[in-house]
Amino acid sequence: MRRTAVADARNGTSAPFGRLMTAMITPFKEDGAVDFERAAELARNLVASGNDGLIVTGTTGEGPTLTEDEKLELYRVTKRAVGEASIIAGTGNYNTAESIHLTREAEKCGVDGALLVVPYYNNPPQEGLYRHFKAIASATSLPCILYNVPPRSPRNLDAATLKRLAEIDNVVGVKEASGKLEQFNAVISAVPDGFLVYSGNDSDTHTIMSLGGYGVISVSAHLVAGRTKRMIELLAAGRTAEAAAIHLELLPLVEALFWQPNPMPVRAALNELGFRVGTPRLPLIDLTDAEKERLRAVLARYEFDPYLSKQPVGAESR
């Protein structure tokens, strides 16, 4: 099935994943344990709100502070929860052998693909990046999306390297989160038809899709998947001016979700809107009271997806 999906993506008949995917947070209980029941509920709500798929245990899911057992159980429970929607497992890190192992274990859990981040901390050269990603992709039948995020990794995945990697059958896309227009242009110009270029930042979705990108791996779609989906549909139809109006409407919210390191603000926003997901694991921390008040002021300006409260908790008392 996955090999067929990969082939279909390459010949343009379909894609293994949809245009709107959310990088899902990992709910925690008060004692810091993973709340698997809440994770399944959140996954169902996100798909019901318009998401085509979810990234589980990525950056937003605080993958670096989860154990392997926690990650594998999250893959199982979210996949059971969403049925036909895509679950993409964040299995990459800076250790190639560990990334291969986790990707293989994730495949056994029934996930639909793997997200492989550019190795951080050890700062490999471009040839090292190529060999790292090739080794992981060669060890699995899962479709793989690469993740270029220079703000969190010291090394940019150059367009020339990505072009080489796109020749590997099951390397089907990239999450492009450099935030740089010249990188967007280079990537979209370099990759073959059918290769999925996702915006890795909500603020860049309009630009990347206008240039020919495929969709977005979102954070703000925890809250406004419906509006984000509409923007994507308009962009896919070439109606860029109408899409720009939604982009500008959502931009203050998107910016608020990155005032502090992701996923601290979006986790606080979900808590404020009545869907309790706990506080981050160290070294991330909860927002301060002043930061939460500032966030509430932005949240009060928006209508959110149906599973969330209409306004921030406690807004009526102010």
Image (cartoon, helix red, strand yellow):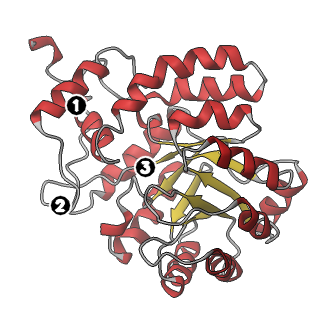
How far apart are labels 3 and 1 at the CA level? 17 Å
The residue positioned 85% from the left and 62% from the top of the image is 7
Q: Quadrant of the N terminus?
A: bottom right
- Rendered position, 203 above or below 44: above
Q: Position of residue 19 (x, y in %)?
A: 66, 41
Q: Quick one: 224 or 259, which is closer to the camera?
A: 259
- Within-10-Å neighbours for mark 1: few <14, some 14–19, many 20+: many
Residue labelled with disc 3: 24
First reached walking from the N terminus: tag 2 or tag 3: 3
The location of residue 114, given as percent across then percent down, is 59, 65
Q: Would you call the spot at circle 3 few (<14 residues within 10 Å), some (14-19), or many (20 or more)?
A: many
- Left or right: 60 with respect to 32? right
Q: Return the residue nearer the eye: 138 or 68.
A: 138
- Residue 46 horizontal/vertical position (percent): 47, 39
Left or right of 17, for residue 317: left
Q: Looking at the picture, which amino acid does disc 3 mark?
A: Met
Splitting the image into 4 quarters, where does residue 132 fall? Answer: bottom right
**Which residue lies under the disc numbered 2?**
32
Residue receiving disc 1: 272
Q: Is residue 4 above or below residue 21?
A: below
Q: Are the residues tagged 2 and 3 within 8 Å (C-beta)?
A: no
**Label 2 neighbourhood size at 10 Å, few (<14), some (14-19), many (20+)?**
few
> From mark 2 to mark 1, how far is it between C-alphas?
19 Å
Task: Tell me the SS state at disc 2.
Answer: loop
**Image quarter (top left, top right, bottom left or bottom right) of the C terminus:** top left
Q: Nearer the viewer, residue 20 or 239?
A: 239
Residue at left offset 28%, top offset 16%: 300
Can you see residue 112?
no
How many marks overall? 3
* Left or right, 200 with reference to 8: left
Q: Amino acid at mark 2?
A: Gly
